[in-house]
């Protein structure tokens, strides 16, 4: 049996095309995984953006209502909420922003 294998290997030696094809397949798998990761990150970003829009819309409505009612206490509460939410948002951005890699 080993004689047949030796004969086969001499007649059909492994070629670089096989290795190149395998390398190409590996690169395609890597690109596919990267695309899946990016797709998930984009979806997460959309969720964050939607939440930020909702937050800003709510703040705008509260501000307009307080101004129309000339309600000083409501304006002070809104300012305090805005300050608190700004700090939370800033911390979340910092925590979820990858450090630049040295290239």
Image (cartoon, rainbow, N blue to C red):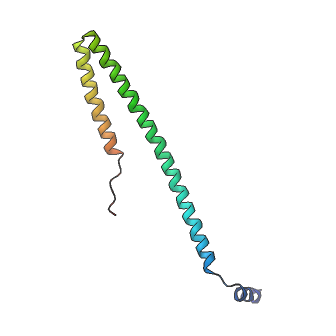
Which residue is found at the position 24% from the left and 23% from the top?
79
Q: Position of residue 13 (x, y in %)?
A: 67, 85
Judge whether 62 appears above or below 28 on screen: above
Judge whether 3 appears above or below 57 on screen: below
Q: Where, by quadrant of the figure, is residue 15 drawn?
A: bottom right
Which quadrant is the C terminus positioned in? Answer: bottom left
Q: Where, by quadrant of the figure, is residue 27 drawn?
A: bottom right
Q: Where, by quadrant of the figure, is residue 67 drawn?
A: top left
Judge whether 21 appears above or below 30 on screen: below
Q: Position of residue 84 (x, y in %)?
A: 27, 29
Which residue is found at the position 32% from the left and 36% from the top?
89
Horizontal side, residue 41 vs residue 86: left or right = right
Q: Which of the two residues, 7 or 60, is positioned nearer the viewer here?
A: 60
Which residue is found at the position 74% from the left and 85% from the top?
8
Q: Position of residue 96 (x, y in %)?
A: 36, 45
Which quadrant is the N terminus positioned in? Answer: bottom right
Which residue is found at the position 77% from the left and 87% from the top?
4
View extreme (top): residue: 69
The count of marks equals 0
């Amino acid at each position: 049996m080993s004689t047949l294998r030796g004969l086969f290997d001499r007649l059909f030696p492994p070629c670089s095309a096989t290795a190149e094809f395998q390398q190409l397949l590996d690169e395609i798998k890597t690109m596919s995984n990267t695309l899946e990761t990016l797709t998930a990150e984009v979806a997460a970003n959309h969720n964050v953006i939607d939440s930020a829009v909702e937050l800003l819309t709510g703040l705008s409505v509260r501000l307009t209502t307080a101004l129309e009612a000339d309600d000083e206490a409501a304006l002070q509460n809104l300012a305090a909420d805005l300050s608190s939410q700004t700090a939370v948002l800033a911390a979340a951005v910092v925590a979820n922003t990858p450090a630049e890699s040295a290239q």
